[in-house]
Image (cartoon, rainbow, N blue to C red):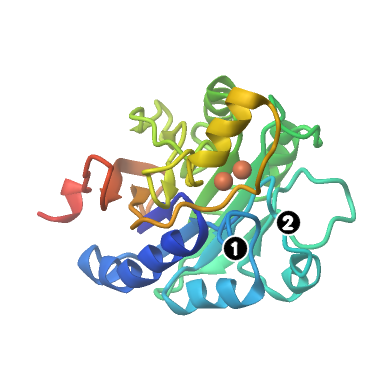
């Protein structure tokens, strides 16, 4: 199975880049499944139902979220009817939506997509380790699903690495999101789980985390908020992780960064081009 995970879409320029590139990427790499983090898709904060629909129409199979999941209040309602939209699993019981979803590829394979949030320098949610462990105990690779992908939305690299080794061999991939800066540590762990500490963002990299630089600089310098954070408006680059999953075991065979666009060093999954 060929799976592509794209990092947090930030604002209009991130959306446009994804909508334009995704159909071509699906053809070029013969992708079976595409997961995109959409927590910053609507003006940098949350996601609306019409944006979600555009991403699904462009070929996304699942959209994951994070700490900005419900910044657009309409998401509290429409998430209930959108089975491909997944919010962090470890929100308090009773939170609308789902933290994990079983979805099918065009070829009929089953993919379990899980979204969870870290707790270091983040809101204090339930324990992500225990929440994910319960999901993986209920759904074992090749028994409950052909592939299991976890979007671990967290700030601390240590927490992301600990979670990845905690599930090594039980999930196809753990993809870190939230920091919007791609790390260069993508690899397949010893027991077969693909991992990257942070996959980066789909947004304008000529920015601070996808936001126009002026207000972030102002807040660091003066400590007084002067304006809202606005997504940077320059052309966006896409940043993601390409993962090849063994159909027999559900574990990862290889993974590679995919980076396309301005202000970001390009990277391509060479193993899909041969
Ligand atoms: Fe984000
Ligand atoms: Fe986030």
Residue 159 relative to residue 131: left or right: left
In what quadrant of the picture does the N terminus appear? bottom left
Q: Are marks 2 and 1 in contact (CB under 8 Å)?
A: yes
Whole-angstrom CA distance, mark 2 to mark 1, is 9 Å
x and y percentages locating residue 119 in the rendered image:
72, 29
Q: Is residue 35 above or below residue 156?
A: below
Graded by Cα atoms within 10 Å as few (under 14), some (14 to 19) or many (20 or more), the crowding at tag 1 reads: many
Q: Which mark is residue 71?
A: 2
Give how far across and how far down residue 179 sits, in percent. 52, 36
Q: Position of residue 241 (x, y in %)?
A: 36, 46
Q: Residue extending furthest left?
A: 274
Name the residue at 64% across, 55% down.
45
Image quadrant assignment for residue 247:
bottom left
Name, please, the residue furthest toward the right: 94
Q: Is there any visible trace of residue 179 in the rendered image?
A: yes
Q: Residue at x 80, y 65 (%)?
A: 76
Q: How many marks?
A: 2
Image quadrant in which the C terminus is located: bottom left
* Residue 251 screen position, x and y as percent: 41, 44
- Residue under the image location 57 percent in, 23 percent down: 162
Q: Residues within 10 Å of mark 2 (few under 14, many from 20)?
A: some
Could you tell me which secondary element the residue under label 2 belongs to? loop
Q: Nearer the viewer, residue 25 or 164?
A: 25
- Front one among 46 and 115: 46
Residue 144 in sight in this render: no
Q: Secondary structure at mark 1?
A: loop
Residue ID for mark 1: 42
């Amino acid at each position: 199975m060929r799976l592509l995970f794209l990092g947090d879409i930030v604002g209009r320029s991130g959306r446009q880049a994804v909508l334009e590139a995704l159909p071509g990427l699906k053809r070029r790499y013969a992708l079976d499944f595409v997961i995109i983090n959409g927590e910053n898709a609507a003006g940098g904060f949350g996601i609306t139902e019409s944006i979600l629909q555009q991403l699904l129409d462009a070929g996304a199979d699942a959209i994951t979220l994070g700490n900005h999941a419900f910044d657009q209040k309409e998401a509290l309602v429409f998430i209930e009817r959108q089975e491909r939209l997944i919010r962090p699993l470890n929100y308090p019981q009773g939170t609308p939506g789902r933290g994990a979803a079983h979805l099918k590829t065009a070829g009929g394979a089953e993919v379990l997509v899980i979204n969870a949030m870290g707790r270091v320098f983040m809101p204090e949610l339930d324990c992500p380790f225990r929440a994910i462990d319960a999901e993986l105990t209920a759904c074992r690779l090749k028994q409950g699903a052909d592939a299991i992908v976890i979007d671990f939305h967290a700030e601390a690299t240590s927490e992301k690495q600990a979670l990845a080794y905690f599930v090594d061999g039980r999930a196809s991939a753990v993809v870190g999101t939230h920091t919007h800066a791609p790390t260069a540590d993508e690899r397949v762990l010893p027991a077969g789980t693909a991992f990257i500490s942070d996959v980066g963002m789909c947004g304008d990299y000529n920015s601070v985390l996808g936001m126009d630089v002026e207000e972030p600089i102002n807040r660091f310098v003066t400590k007084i908020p002067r304006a809202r954070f606005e997504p940077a408006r320059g052309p966006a680059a896409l940043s993601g992780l390409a993962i090849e999953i063994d159909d027999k075991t559900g574990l990862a065979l290889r993974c590679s960064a995919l980076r396309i666009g301005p202000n970001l060093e390009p990277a391509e999954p060479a193993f899909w081009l041969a």
